[in-house]
Amino acid sequence: MHTVLIVGAGGVGSVVAHKCAQVPEVFGRIVLASRTLARCEAVRDSVRARTGRTIEIEQVDANDVPATVALLRRVRPALLLNLALPYQDLPLMDACLEAGVDYLDTANYEPPDEAKFEYKWQWAYRERYERAGRMALLGSGFDPGVTNVFCAYAQKHLFDTIETIDIVDCNAGDHGHPFATNFNPEINIREVTAPGRYWEDGDWKTTPALSESMTFDFPQIGPRKAYLMYHEELESLVQHIPGLRRIRFWMTFGDAYLTHLRVLENIGMTSIEPVEVDGHPVVPLKLLEALLPDPASLAENYEGKTCIGCLVEGTKDGRRRRVFVYNVCDHRAAYAEVGSQAISYTTGVPAMVGAKMMLEGTWHAPGVHHMEQFDPDPFLQDLARHGLPWHVEER
């Protein structure tokens, strides 16, 4: 049994705490920390009610490296699971290095003052983690995360050569609000309003935000319109899937969401540049975040399903092949099990499974690594066992 420190008590952090508590043979002692202690208390009470286990809680500012180091030295975990904001990846990686603790996250670093997320800042830690004999596993969520593992599985079992990959993400759920985001509003809106970006024939191509779309037939959901976006798993997969000619990422949005977003963008509410209001600097997107519903509050009334997967095309035994590797998750089922909506659930379960892989030594190597660099089979076996069954469909 191992001790783990979970940093972040939002929707995903709550799922991870619940799922770790369900596996006591691996996660013997669970400590949950956040800047807001009340959030930790609510998660602790829910975990106790649902699993009968008691987790410990602590208060910490993830941006404060000395405070995090002090907490790590007091708790002495085998692994830190970072479920805080992407802005806090680097301070937490620094703290883990100083305290000699392995690290896992679900989303790559993004500077607070620039809407640009990429792996270069975290890749810069490779040599330091190798020298320290510590491991950092990046992007152990669903996308990135499970989608990376789906690609590795396709490479290992389904294809001799992979030529194209289209990662598609559909949330066909309904939360009853005219406009809301399924995870941190600031991160979500910055991601959606950024230019589209994909990789083809050795180069990155850029498109205006949400300017390209396609209709995709999602299992258990049906045809939905999906829009081309940039997503961080593309950046690592182009390095680890040999022979790849093109890789793209697509996400579905309802008309109401896009209409609200377009209006908010037109009036400047999605900007991260401060404006002066009565002599005080105000970041419009921060104000919008304060006005929108807390993503965790959406769970109780959420209905419908999500479907996320990888459409992979290439050759096997000299013949053309096209398959869709995917998962479908139900919002109501996620709420019944852990009190969350499916977006948080599909991120939180892979974080727990990735942590389990590391703690059991199934996946372990000093340095900074991505999910597709390890054997996909044990991860996918545990993923299905712990709530996210996956399927392979010939297309």
Image (spheres, rainbow, N blue to C red):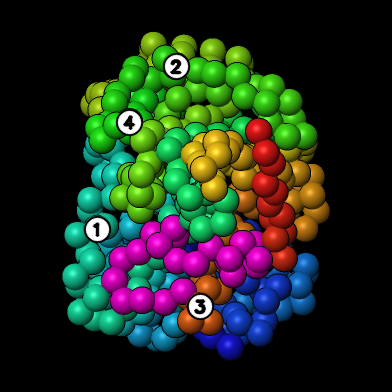
Q: For the residues marked 2 and 4, what is the alpha-carbon distance in whole angstroms?
A: 15 Å
Percent x, y of residue 379: 58, 66
Q: Which mark is residue 300?
A: none
In which quadrant will I find the C terminus? top right
Q: Which mark is residue 212?
A: 2
Q: Is residue 333 visible?
A: yes
Contact? badges 1 and 4 (CB < 8 Å): no
Q: Which mark is residue 362?
A: 3
Q: For the residues marked 1 and 4, what is the alpha-carbon distance in whole angstroms?
A: 22 Å
| Dot 4: element | strand
Q: Which residues are magenta?
A: 363-383
Amino acid carrying label 2: it is Glu
Say which quarter of the image contains residue 19.
Answer: bottom right
Q: What residue appears at the point 71 percent right and 55 percent down from the top-left corner?
A: 389
Percent x, y of residue 192: 43, 28
Is 49 magenta? The answer is no
| Dot 1: element | helix
Q: Earlier in the sequence, mark 1 or mark 4?
A: 1
Percent x, y of residue 5: 48, 74
Q: For the residues marked 3 and 1, what is the alpha-carbon distance in whole angstroms?
A: 22 Å
Amino acid carrying label 1: it is Trp
Q: Can you identify the residue that label 4 sits on?
A: 200
Whether residue 338 sits left or right of residue 347 in the image: it is right
Graded by Cα atoms within 10 Å as few (under 14), some (14 to 19) or many (20 or more), the crowding at tag 2 reads few
Which residue appears farthest toward the front when viewing the image? 318
